[in-house]
Amino acid sequence: MDRTTAEQCLVRLRCNFGSLNTKEKAIAAFILENPSAIKGLSIHKLAALLDVSLGTIVNFCKGLGFSGYRELRRAFFFLPAEYQDLTLKYGPDLEPMDLAEQVWTHALQTLQDTLLVLDREAFNRAARALAASKRISFFARGGSARLAENAARKFIRWGHSVLAYREFDQQKRAASSLGKDSTAIGISYSGKTKEVVECLQIAKEQGAFTIVITSCELSPAAQIGDAVLLGAVRGPEMFGENEFAKLAHVVILDALYFYCIREQIGASHVLTQMRS
């Protein structure tokens, strides 16, 4: 166990908070607000404090990958006593540049958090599947659709078939046309967007490799993905979206793009050498 384990736990709690039930949310909220307090609380004291059963706490800990409360508690011993989570303050009396500095800090921390929880093996699978694909289709709605369109414009330079439609009917047709040489990329902050989930399911049934970029690993979309890439959450949720999570999703997409371009450049270099 080390400090990173506790930090990963906090990042995942923020990401998955919206998908927890009422009692799980009570436990998660307490840990997020009082991460250092866990060190001095027995499972019995925590259960009494939050009015939940011992079994609920144990199952909650197992859902985070710990064997039980004792292992979770041990992980938090490596957090410094002065540890405090970031809170974005944007009151009316705040100077513009002071707010800007907070946004910068949150943006940087979001990317660092994402690196903590990004599944290395899942990312490797996703990158290699993309590099081997002849067709790529993006599926997203709302604010995530803009991220998908921007990513598609980059990937299309690769010379393969790349699609990113806004209309749901077009997305469904695109998903139905995919095959084993294709990759479907679903982008959804909540992972609950019905249209994205449906398109991913269709694509998977057609044999396509499915990549899910989300900020909730407990979501319906994440259950479908062959590779689930988690973007961290920071700051407030506004209009059903999180601006800092979008930033994490953009960087994940860029990292995939850079890998594919590197592979293309490498392959081209080899062909040039063979022809000369």
Image: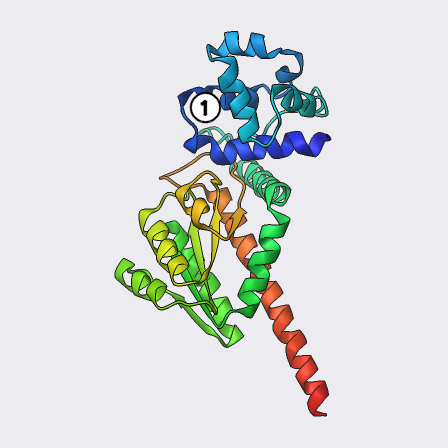
Tell me residue 261's x, y (percent): 60, 69
In the picture shown, does residue 116 fall above or below 172? Answer: above
**Location of residue 147 by image quarter:** bottom left
Tell me residue 265's x, y (percent): 64, 75
Give left or right: position of 203 versus 214: left
Tell me residue 214's x, y (percent): 47, 46
**Which residue has dot 1 on it?**
25
Q: Quadrant of the C terminus?
A: bottom right
In the picture shown, does residue 216 fall above or below 62? Answer: below
**Which amino acid does the dot numbered 1 rest on?**
Lys
Question: Does residue 235 appear in the picture of this structure?
Answer: no
Residue drawn at x 62%, y 11% as measured from the top left: 41
| Closer-to-camera residue (184/201) | 201
Q: Secondary structure at mark 1?
A: helix
Total marks in image:
1
Q: Which residue is most to the left?
A: 169
In the picture shown, does residue 90 fall above or below 201? Answer: above
| Closer-to-camera residue (209/37) | 209
Q: How is the image coloured?
A: rainbow
Residue drawn at x 60%, y 41% as measured from the top left: 117
**Location of residue 82 by image quarter:** top right
Tell me residue 10's x, y (percent): 58, 30
Give left or right: position of 62 versus 214: right
In the picture shown, does residue 86 fall above or below 105? Answer: above
Q: Quadrant of the N terminus?
A: top right
Question: Does residue 193 appear in the picture of this structure?
Answer: yes
Residue drawn at x 37%, y 54% as measured from the top left: 201
CA neighbours of label 1 inside 10 A, class few (<14), some (14 to 19), many (20+): some
Residue drawn at x 46%, y 38% as measured from the top left: 218
